[in-house]
Structure formats: structure tokens, C-alpha cells
Image: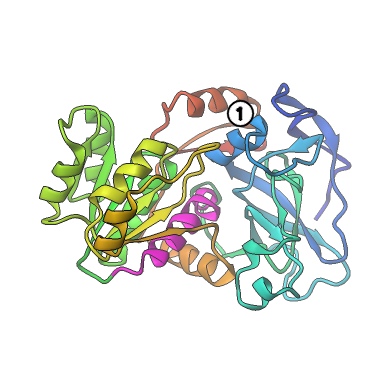
Amino acid sequence: MSVPKTQMAIVFDEDKGPLNYREIAVPTPKPNELLINVKYSGVCHTDIHVHAADWPVKNKLPLVGGHEGAGVVVGMGENVVGWKVGDLAGIKWLNGSCLSCEFCYNSNESNCAQADLSGCTHDGSFQQYATADAVQAARIPKGTDLAQVAPILCAGITVYKALKTAGLKAGEWVAISGAAGGLGSLAIQYAKAMGYRVLAIDGGEEKGEFCKSLGAEYFADFTKSKDLVEEIKTATEGGPHGAINVSVSEFAIRQSCEYVRSCGTVVLVGLPAEAKVVAPVFDAVVKSISIKGSYVGNRADSAEAIDFFARGLVKCPIKIVGLSELPKVFELLKAGQVLGRYVVDTSK
């Protein structure tokens, strides 16, 4: 395939700096990398945190953000095996890892100290051509709608891994905090497909109808509830067996430790800057609850999450805009005005 020398991208040169839509060089893949013509990229709340530099991770600068890129392989380094030009490939948050430490050996590559992160330490998917380690790049089935699959590459994989981390059984209740957002809307669908009963938590009538349309059995509106904890306990006859916190509310995380039932599991996914987990020790011990962090999925989790999508069991509600409109999308995300997921078309 013909590859141009230059391309359009969204770049920021300093943390919190302007998001510039400009022409840059097309990268050359390293011996272990694929060169992917990114057709679409989802926009994740993590991209906001990276741009704001409010996490304890040092960004590459200048930086092309984005880590939900879906496209076509147009080139590769000389050491790559198992891929060919024309294959569909996905760019994930985890771009690469050392593959030789204890975490990589045990399929916890995301915990590798040498992990390379798309749109953070490695130029990401807010450009027309991007590189990805061939080992970690996601394999996308032929014929897949690339705009629709893009959010699965982070949001989908992340919530699927979180649901697995909760260790639930079919028929048990799971509460999803921040349920109407990009991660939450997918979490509802994955949970239903895995056989769980879903209680969705978010604010506003529109979000409530949206969550129910995706399969939530009960919607708890934190803007109207007089006692959210008691409402959730009543609706689930004692509290959900698991709670998935994809919201970025420290208060919501604290509440999940209160309403989860005895022997239940609270899973932390959303990453509000400088937030703390607050749980009364007496209650946590007597109720025997577990509090677990869940990061991004490994290669097996990724393949499984994409398979759910390929079989039509999950679908992310998306709105497609041009890459040049990304700064406006960032503002909408900051204001909490996004239902589902924005996806950028890199050709515009």
C-alpha cells in the first residue's frame, strides 16, 4: 500500500497546551512494530487526564494522543511475524511491554514497569498513521465496522476486564456507577451478555432511559434519590454482589463500599485525580468486602472483548466527528455532556 510522507494529526507540545490540528511526518515502524493507517479513533476520558497531566505518568512531548485506534496495516518492521499488509488492527492503551518480567510472564503486561502507553508515552491514534507493537496490537476480524469497534479497544476491554475482576456468577447483581458514559454504556451490555443483573447509576432522566435501553434492570438517579445507598440495597434485595466504578467521582466510590452486599466486590476503574478510597474498616471487615483495582485487559481479555462485539452482543453508541473537531469533544467530555462515545474520523 502507498504510504505518504506526511499526515494530519492533533498534537500538543506541552502539558495542558493547545490541541493543534497540523501536518506531521508519518512515523517509521521499528523492527517489532506495525504501521497502521488509522481510520477511526475513539475519544476516552483518559485522553483528558493525559492532556491535563494530572496523573503521575510523564507524557512524551510533543504528543499525539489517543488509544482507541482502528485501522489497516500498511507496513511493518522486519521482525514482525503473524501479520500481513491489509489486516485490520487496533491500537490499545497498552502499546507494548518488555515481555520478560514477572508481570508479563503472568499475563499482566499492563503492570510491566516498561509498559509503553499509546497516547501517553507513545504517539497514539489521533493521527492518520500510527505505530503499534505487533505483539500487543489488537486483531480485528475482517469486515468489521472500524468506527464501531474503535471504542471497544479501550472502553470495551477495560469494562470487560473489570467485570471479570468482580468474579460474579450469572444471575447476580452488579451496580455500574457512571453507567451512561462511554465505559458505563458498554459495561451494561457486557454485564447482560455475561448473565448478570444490572443496576445502573447516573444522573438525569435522559441518562436513565438510555441505560434502560441498553439492558439495565434498574436505574438509580443520584440527582433525585433521597438516600442512594438504601435505594440500591432495596432494589437489589441486600445490595449488589459487585460494584463497577467507572465514574470519576470519589464520593461515588465511597458509596459503593457502603451499598455492596456482604462478601461483595468493589472494582475501581475510573481514575479521578488524587482521589482516595474511603471505607469504614469495621464495616469492610464485618461485611468481608473486597476492594480491587482493575486496569486494562491483557491480550486474552482483549480478544474476548472484541469477540463479544463481533458476535453482536455489545455495541457502543457512537457519534462520529472529524479529527479536526477533537478540541470541541474534549470540552464536552470535561463538562460531562457525552452519552456513549465520540469517535473521530481521521480523514476529516
Query: Was residue 155 drawn as part of the magenta stretch in this picture?
Result: yes
Give the main secondary structure, helix, strand or loop, of the magenta stretch. Answer: helix
Location of residue 338 in the rendering, given as x and y in whole percent from the top left corner: 42, 31
Observer-nearest of 285 and 83: 285
What range of the chain is rendered magenta? 149-168
Image quarter hosting the C terminus: top right
Q: Secondary structure at mark 1?
A: helix
The residue lying at 58 percent from left, 36 percent from top is 344
Query: Was residue 75 drawn as part of the magenta stretch in this picture?
Result: no
Residue at the bottom extreme? 105
Location of residue 44 in the rendering, given as x and y in whole percent from the top left corner: 54, 40
Observer-nearest of 121 and 85: 121
Any part of residue 15 in sight: yes
Location of residue 291 in the rendering, given as x and y in whole percent from the top left corner: 40, 58
Mark 1 closeness class: few <14, some 14–19, many ≥20 residues within 10 Å: many
| Quarter-of-image position of residue 50 | top right
Relative placement, left or right, of 310 versus 196 is right
Image quarter hosting the N terminus: bottom right
Observer-nearest of 12 and 110: 110
